Image: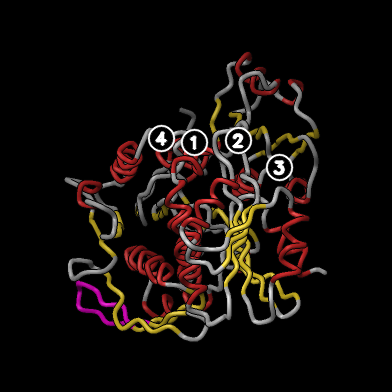
Amino acid sequence: MYQIDFEKPEKVHFIGIGGISMSGLAEILLSRGFSVSGSDWHKSPLTQKLEKDGAVIYEGQRKENISPDLSVVVYTAAVHPDNPEYREAVCLGLPLLSRAELLGELMRNYKKAAAVAGTHGKTTTTSMLTEILLKEGMDPTVSVGGMLPSIGGNVRIGYSDCMVAEACEYTNSFLELYPTVSVILNIREDHLDFFRDIDDIRSSFRRFAQRTPADGAVVIDTGIEDYREIVRDLPCRIITVGEGEEADYQAKDVVYDSLDDARFTVVTSAGEREDVRLKVPGAHNVENALAAIAAARFLGAGWEAIRAGLLHYEGTERRFQKKGEFAGVTVVDDYAHHPDEIRATLSAAAAMHFSKVWCVFQPHTYSRTRALFEDFAQALTLADEVVLADIYAAREAFDPGISSEMLAERVRELGRPAHHFDSFEKIEKFLYEHCMHGELLITMGAGDIVKVGEALTNG
């Protein structure tokens, strides 16, 4: 595999450079003196910024964009072998790297590299860790799966030996990374259009943990079923977080304020007792914070930076993000698209003393909805009233065997009012007519359901 060396900047071309992740990786290479070119079907603010920073951007994808003097060509998962640029790169014998492989090659260049993995909580924990390391003055390079206000986007370019990256398990892309600190938050059934079953998923997380070097560490939550099997016989340090006296990092004396934000004492196996406070709601964020704290301590952060960083973190876009109000109804948006995430978000909402909690949920992919159908229905009953949009297909073809109407019917069978509408316009009309002053409305899902809340709050 072609290896990226910061000491030897070369010429790199990106097929699909306009994507948020690809453009961020291109920014990192530009900052290190590489010559960068790339193509996308349309120019955008992201590609315009890259041009301003020195990249050559092509509108449209043609074989003429690929020249023999390129050192390597990078492509996204959406690029297929019949793509004209990909095909030309193969014909010219140029090295090719996927986006995940490039991220891994970049990570090789950092002595302190944290990769945050898990079925859910990755973006939040990566962001919390980023805030802590910034307060410590460690100047990290960052790649996160959400828009973090304090870094002005999803990528930050640092000039130290420290990197923090969100690590996604889908298509085993996290197995391309080279972390010195591997964080595993949870392991649950998801992405079953790729993984066979939970055992297949656990096997991938085991392989991810095995990539940690002997002088590194795996931070793992003790709430993971049989977590010891995931880290069995690894030569690196194992740092546990969670409930129970066996955990190296525990949260004690947890107290929630009126917004469900937490204050708690971190108790460590080293005998430390430190008080911290969060500005994001829910017990799930206490767990996320513990993992971020453990990773930060291993990387060298002190408790003052930990307290300041966690207090500075107020969430990323689409993570319980307040969108505004209409007719006295508070509207927030959340990216939750797995039953565990839904439970966490709705449990936090239930503690906020609104008169009613509405959940407007858009299921994400047919395969996930089918595989976790009963879990979705059970989780949604934590809302007082449920409204379902049609399934967001994403990468999948239409599946007539599963639908949001079926999910609504199951939620009703479980004793909660549930409604299904086949358009956002119908959902907006229903909500406007039925939501009341003092209630909370949460738009939820990984698709474009956020548009419903934005339409309501924008009048």
Looking at the picture, tell me which residue is in the foreground, 380 or 163.
Answer: 380
> Which residue is at 55% across, 45% downward?
406
Instruction: Left or right? Give the position of 132 relative to 53.
Output: left
**Residue at image mark 2:** 395
Asked if marks 1 and 3 touch (Cβ < 8 Å), the reply is: no
> Which residue is at 60% across, 35% downward?
395
Which circle, 1 or 2, is nearer the viewer? 2
Amino acid found under the numbered disc labelled 4: Phe
Q: How many angstroms separate mark 1 from mark 4 (CA)?
A: 20 Å
398 shown above or below 86: below
Label 2 crowd (10 A; few <14 / some 14-19 / many >=20): few
- Label placed on residue 101: 1
Magenta segment boundaries in residue numbering? 264-274
Which circle, 1 or 4, is nearer the viewer? 4
N-terminal-most mark, 1 or 4: 1
**Residue at image mark 3:** 18
Q: How many angstroms separate mark 1 from mark 2 (CA)?
A: 21 Å
Q: How many angstroms separate mark 3 from mark 4 (CA)?
A: 28 Å
Q: Position of residue 238 (x, y in %)?
A: 23, 56
**Residue at image mark 4:** 195
Instruction: Left or right? Give the position of 314 relative to 116.
Output: right
**Chief secondary structure of the magenta portion:** strand
Q: Position of residue 159 (x, y in %)?
A: 53, 58
N-terminal-most mark, 1 or 3: 3
Q: How many angstroms separate mark 1 from mark 3 (CA)?
A: 18 Å
352 shown above or below 133: below
Asked if marks 1 and 2 touch (Cβ < 8 Å), the reply is: no
Q: How many angstroms separate mark 3 from mark 2 (CA)?
A: 19 Å
Specify whether residue 362 is painted magenta.
no
N-terminal-most mark, 1 or 2: 1
Q: How many angstroms separate mark 4 from mark 2 (CA)?
A: 15 Å
Amino acid found under the numbered disc labelled 2: Arg
